[in-house]
Amino acid sequence: MPSFDIVCEPNMVKVKNAVENSGKEVGTRFDFKGTAAAIEIKDKDITLIGDAEFQLQQVTDILMGKLSKQEVDPRFLDKGDVQKMGGDKVKQVLKVRSGIETEQAKKIQKLIKESKVKVQAAIQGDALRVTGTKKDDLQATMALVRKEMADLPLSFNNFRD
């Protein structure tokens, strides 16, 4: 029986490369000389540090440019609140999304059921497995999910015939 998986997984190697390249650019840019501007990654948390919110926004723009060069969708990042550190410094933590949250998975499952396409969607951990009897039904389901869930960076893999 044909099937595929709906997943939400970034390529972490590309994300780390983008963060490292952003860190190099922040370190060499003239307008950041002598400031606290920095960017670092630990596990799936990217920390941006700056002297002011304006500078934090500039560092974010650099990161977004590097992510797009690495072909990583910026929708994988969940921006946290800007927090004050000691002195004038501010920081912001960006979390890298990995896996589909339960609420989102249920929403996708409900969307597939309401579409009346003859497929079944089952939640398996942080992914969704969609099975059906015809390839055309599966492809129609992919198109539907792409269209309706545009705010999530979903990908389809493990396509079986």
Image: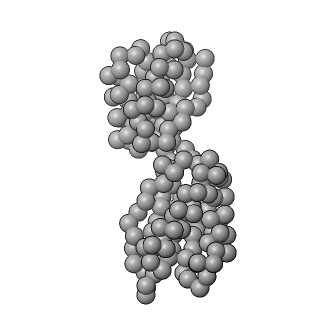
Asked whether 118 or 76 is in front, the reply is: 76
In the image, residue 62 above or below residue 146: below
What kind of colouring is applied to the model shown? one colour
Indicate the quadrant where residue 39 lies: bottom right
Q: Does residue 139 appear in this view?
A: yes
Q: Residue at x 58, y 57 (%)?
A: 65
Q: Is residue 13 left or right of residue 39?
A: right
Q: Residue at x 54, y 47 (%)?
A: 73
On the image, the x and y values in percent for residue 112 come to 38, 25
On the image, the x and y values in percent for residue 76 come to 50, 50
In the image, residue 151 above or below residue 67: above
Q: Residue at x 42, y 21 (%)?
A: 120
Q: Residue at x 65, y 69 (%)?
A: 25
- Image quadrant containing the N terminus: top right
In the image, residue 120 above or below residue 9: above
**Outermost residue toward the top in this view:** 134
Asked whether 109 or 124 is in front, the reply is: 109
On the image, the x and y values in percent for residue 126 come to 47, 41
Asked whether 150 or 31 is in front, the reply is: 31
On the image, the x and y values in percent for residue 68 come to 59, 51
**Outermost residue toward the front in this view:** 31
Indicate the quadrant where residue 9 lies: top right
- Image quadrant containing the C terminus: top right
Q: Does residue 11 appear in this view?
A: no
